[in-house]
Amino acid sequence: MAQHSDDVVESVAMQLISSDASVLPVTAELSYRASDPYTVRAVFSSPQSTSVWLIGRDLLVQGMLADADDPAGNGDVQVWRDEDPLFVLISLTGIEGSALLAAPADAVEHFITRTEDLVAIGAESDRMEGELTALIAALLTA
């Protein structure tokens, strides 16, 4: 993905925690576009595979404050702080199975802060005004 001035792209070293508690290294490329202000695109890569997920930015923000007893998210993606405050956990559930990833909390916080520099939390809809106007116009002329 080509990076523009209205993009934030950050590579984060994470750990995939398997069901037997073994840990495999995974690289996550987190990307955020001001033109799509609600969404974080996460590309998880390991030597064996690559997986792309779309995660709500607000879900990441809420997950930084959540714990295992009450994680942020109630669908395919859940996020919460680990008992070790240095990590945030991300649970992904899909057709092919589920994954639990541990990410350094400071790296995720840094990424979120950089996205907030582009689009403040709560101001996402301001960025969508042009797209919504075009969609409404297209629907009315169809």
Image (cartoon, rainbow, N blue to C red):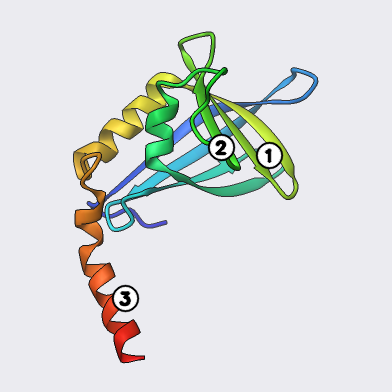
Quadrant of the rendered image containing residue 83: top right
Height in image: 121 above or below 36?
above
Q: Nearer the viewer, residue 18 or 61?
A: 61
Judged left or right of residue 18, residue 68 is left
Local packing at callout 2 (Cα closer than 10 Å; few below 14, some 14-19, many 20+) is: few
Q: Position of residue 111 (x, y in %)?
A: 34, 33
Q: Residue at 32% of width from left, 27% of height from top?
A: 110
Q: Are marks 3 and 1 in contact (CB under 8 Å)?
A: no
The amino acid on which the numbered mark 3 sits, given as a three-letter code, is Leu
The amino acid on which the numbered mark 1 sits, given as a three-letter code, is Pro
Judged left or right of residue 22, residue 106 is left
- What residue would you read off at disc 2? 74
Q: Residue at 75% of width from left, 47% of height from top?
A: 96
Which circle, 1 or 2, is nearer the viewer? Answer: 2
Please give the label number shown on residue 70. none
> Which one is earlier in the sequence, the residue at label 1 or at label 2?
1
Q: Quadrant of the N terminus?
A: bottom left
Which circle, 2 or 3, is nearer the viewer? Answer: 2
The amino acid on which the numbered mark 2 sits, given as a three-letter code, is Asn
- What residue would you read off at disc 1? 47
Q: Nearer the viewer, residue 55 or 31?
A: 55
Q: Quadrant of the C terminus?
A: bottom left
Q: Nearer the viewer, residue 100 or 59?
A: 59
Q: Nearer the viewer, residue 10 or 141?
A: 141
Which residue, as the protein is rendered here, is positioned at the far bottom? 142
Q: Residue at 52% of width from left, 26% of height from top?
A: 71
Q: Are marks 2 and 3 in contact (CB under 8 Å)?
A: no
Label 3, secondary structure: give it. helix
Which circle, 3 or 1, is nearer the viewer? Answer: 3
Please give the label number shown on residue 135. 3
